[in-house]
Image (cartoon, grey):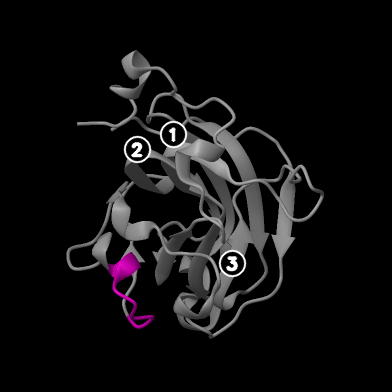
Amino acid sequence: MAQPQPVTEGRTEVIHSASKTPPTDLPWPDISPRAKWSVSSYKFGFGADCLRDGDPDTFWHSDGPQPHFVTIEFPRKVAIQKLCIYLSHPQDDSYTPSALAIRAGTGPSDLQDVRMVTFDRPDGWITFDVSSEPAEDGEGLKPVFAYVLQIIVVANHMGGKDTHVRGLRVLGPVEEGGVDDDPFPFKSPAFKMYETIR
């Protein structure tokens, strides 16, 4: 798998609020099960499955060179509205991410930065939009249409090296229209046959 390139400077959002409410109570649909998940590295027993098991007492523990990242690959292009991540500074201290870069694209080799977020001692579920582009109606932000989403840990609190993430969910739009809302959809039969990865 291709290593992520250095993160470019872009719009960064500081997130201060976290909730103990699980992501199942949110209005956006969880599209995480549709994807194949992989991580840059992990300690035995603390892999990608710990991100999705719904238990905040388990966690992904990176165990390799920086940057650490999670790659989420969908079999077809999907609309991605939000990310929901569980971080716990009180439990994980310097293992807690303080800055994330979100990238999206059609494959690992063409990922583009779509958002940068930073956290100040988070504790709980944090939900934020993947895109930073306003929606056409002026309400909220546009979803991102992609086959691949990558979450890169740019920095940890207190300069920590390895990372702990206790939960991660990918959420679609509330009114999920799928690929038909894509500004550049596949329309012809010749293009339709290449719409999904086999």
Q: Position of residue 98 (x, y in %)?
A: 59, 61
**Residue bearing mark 3:** 127
Q: Give the amino acid at mark 1.
A: Pro
Q: Position of residue 28 (x, y in %)?
A: 53, 65
> Mark 2 = which residue?
76
* Mark whose residue sits in front, 3 or 1: 3
Task: Please report the residue visible at 63 percent of the width from the left and 45 percent of the height from the top.
Answer: 115
* Picture quadrant where residue 112 is located: top right
Label 2 secondary element: strand
Label 2 vs 3, first from the N-terminus? 2
Q: Nearer the viewer, residue 1 or 34?
A: 34
Of the numbered discs 1 and 2, the one sitting upstream in the chain is 1
Question: Horizontal placement of 169 versus 62: left or right?
Answer: right
Q: From what the image shows, is residue 19 above or below residue 130? A: below
Give the overall secondary structure of the magenta segment: loop
Please provide the residue range marked out in magenta: 50-57
Q: Is residue 144 magenta?
A: no
Task: Please report whichever mark, 3 or 1, sits nearer to the chain's N-terminal start.
Answer: 1
1 vs 2, front mark: 2
Name which residue type carries label 2.
Arg
Q: CA distance from mark 3 to mark 1?
A: 23 Å
The residue under label 1 is: 4
Where does residue 183 sit, x and y in percent of width and height? Answer: 59, 29
Say above or below: 94 vs 66.
below
Disc 3 crowd, CA 10 A, few/some/many (<14, 14-19, 20+): many
Secondary structure of the residue carrying numbered label 3: strand
